[in-house]
Image (cartoon, rainbow, N blue to C red):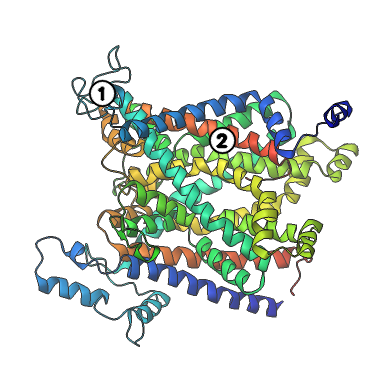
Amino acid sequence: MITYIIRRLLYTIPIIFGVLVVTFILFNIVSGDVSDQIAGKAASAETIKEIRAEYGWDKPLFLSWDSQFINHLKNSLTFQFGRSWSDRELIITKIKQGALPSLSLTVPMFIGELVISISLALIVAFLRGTIIDILSVFICVVLMSVPFLSFILFGQYFLAFKWGLFPVYFWPDLPLPQYVALPILIGIVAGLGGNLRFYRTVMLDELRNDYVRTAFAKGLGTGSVLFRHVLKNAMIPIITQVILAIPFLFLGSLLLERFFGIPGLGYLMIDAIAARDFQIINAMTFIGAILFVVFNLITDICYSIVDPRVSFE
Amino acid sequence: MNKTKEKNVPMIKGRSYWADSLRQLRKHKLAMYSLSIIVVYILVVMFIYLASWTKTDVSFLDWNQTVGKGYEKPNKQNVLGTDFLGRSVLRKTIYGARVSLTVAFWASIISMLIGVPLGAAAGYFRGFIDDIVVWIYTTLSSIPYILLILAFALVLRDKTLNLNWLGLDAISLSGISTVYLAIGLTSWVDICRLIRAETMKHKQREYILAALSYGCSNSRIIFRHLLPNVFHLIIISFSLRFVGFIQAEVILSFLGLGEKNSPSWGSMIDAARLDLPKGYWWEMTAATAAIFLISLALNIFGDALRDSLDPKLKVQ
């Protein structure tokens, strides 16, 4: 078991190295020296020189102990991403500040989505072949076809602006729950189509098994069969889905945060794109990848604990 | 003499796998309606390109023309109303199909050209090549997709690609080409993984062994024997992924990383964002409806295609 975990840990090293190579290629080789863009049109040669020195663009790319590549590895692995150019704040502080608002939006959204779509999927899968099932699958496809942006814009326009049920935009004085209510609702509705369809397929696979027939045959009620027997067995694909979705919760929601002015990580990233603050995108990419690798590791270890058939070879 | 003899032999016409699948697909009415919608979109885009190549002036493609006052409500003259400069929303919506479909088309081509050969090579040769390919795609798939695509779009924007080493001229990336390059370079991972797994399965089959014993070269086995047998997976995968490409283009355009000089559905939604609170709903609605219709058609058609080509396959 321990050797398995150690080997699994060693396996993440080339992947993290690969992520660092990708971010290096993107932000140091392809994009390269953007000091003139950051400094603006009216910058003096000295300012540009300063910027180049700060971000290390005056150093060689490889082949030196002080090269850009070695520094890139060092800085990323110690989470020192430098300062943002637009307001001179440490990038890592900005990311830490943005994490909480992002999580307060994404976590309730995720849990709500999960509970609603799994319960609906159980019911729909149980009624498979009936008109309700066909209709709900069709509604799922319809929901999946509407662009996310339209959900947000029309939702904000009608529910918040026109009918005044929710506040339109974030204002720091009032408590957060009021502001995240509408984005959460929109997020759940927008994601319902795809999720319901996925869980319906999972449940259908499970309902075809013999133990379901046995459970009905011994006289158990529908609710008890669905929620106590089927749901338990359908847990493995669901848990995988859930654990692997957690890293994305930290990244926040790019568009929802933008439209509702929630000062989270999605908002930070959109600001960074507008200001050409590449270092923030670089940092977010690396942190996102690290989280994904870590949670992938956790999933694998959980599997090996839950399911003894997973071999440690 | 010979001919008459042949006539007498009763012909039993077998149906090929593809003919069988097509027959099944043709029975699916909803899928056929969806296909006709897709074909209409494609024809419109082809017409736009034809008109621009032959430099013909077609009045309803002249999206930049002022046809009325700013913010005119939908009326008889301008069916979908006008935007803030008095341009026809209908014309903009029609012209917007060009960006979306072009992006989705090239993104599919790019990701197929990268993903299929890599996946087939990794699954067929295994060993060192497999390790490298798996390493590359595991790395790329560990980076959250939206971030990866943003990072690519961001650094590729306004860049010039130096293709002299390929014997081509330099290509300057702008707007639309940035978008499809960014989407194409990031979305080959899934198809690569799928083709690799399927190639590994097929490699065990007898027909590959037979081809080997005939003395076929590796490239012949891969391109003439293996790939035709996994080709339906490529079609299914892209018919379902096309929607994702169209929606990704909308988001990138909305974030200001897309096409700027001609209308696209993403930039229409972006423009309508500030107009909506003032009550000018028509531009937003037109763009949404255009995206919705093609996405719905692609979703339904893709599902039907999957069911007819490979009923056992599960693509979520």
**Is residue A241 positioned above or below A121 on the image?**
below
Q: Amino acid at mark 2?
A: Asn
Q: Nearer the viewer, residue A41 or B104?
A: B104
Chain under numbered label 1: B
Residue A101 in the image: state x and y as whole percent.
39, 54
Q: Nearer the viewer, residue B124 or A222?
A: B124
The quarter holding residue A89 reads bottom left
Could you give the CA–CA distance between mark 2 and mark 1, rounded to whole angstroms? 31 Å
Q: Which mark is drawn over residue B96?
A: none
| Residue underneath mark 2 | B299
* One can see residue A166 in this view: no
- Is residue A287 shown left or right of residue B10? left
Picture residue at 54% right of the left edge, 25% below the top: B36
Picture residue at 84% right of the left edge, 38% below the top: A220
SS of the residue under disc 2: helix
Residue A115 in the image: state x and y as whole percent.
60, 43
Chain under numbered label 2: B
Farthest residue, direction bottom: A65
The quarter holding residue B4 reads top right
Q: Nearer the viewer, residue A33 or B116?
A: B116
The quarter holding residue A39 reads bottom left
Residue A312 in the image: state x and y as whole percent.
74, 73
Q: Amino acid at mark 1?
A: Thr
- Is residue B292 shown left or right of residue A219? left
Farthest residue, direction top: B76
Picture residue at 36% right of the left edge, 28% below the top: B94
SS of the residue under disc 1: loop
Whichever of labels 2 and 1 marks the residue nearer the N terminus, that label is 1
Residue B273 in the image: state x and y as whole percent.
30, 35
Asked whether the residues under marks 2 and 1 belong to the same chain, the reply is yes
Q: Nearer the viewer, residue A113 or B162?
A: B162
Q: Which mark is drawn over residue B82?
A: 1
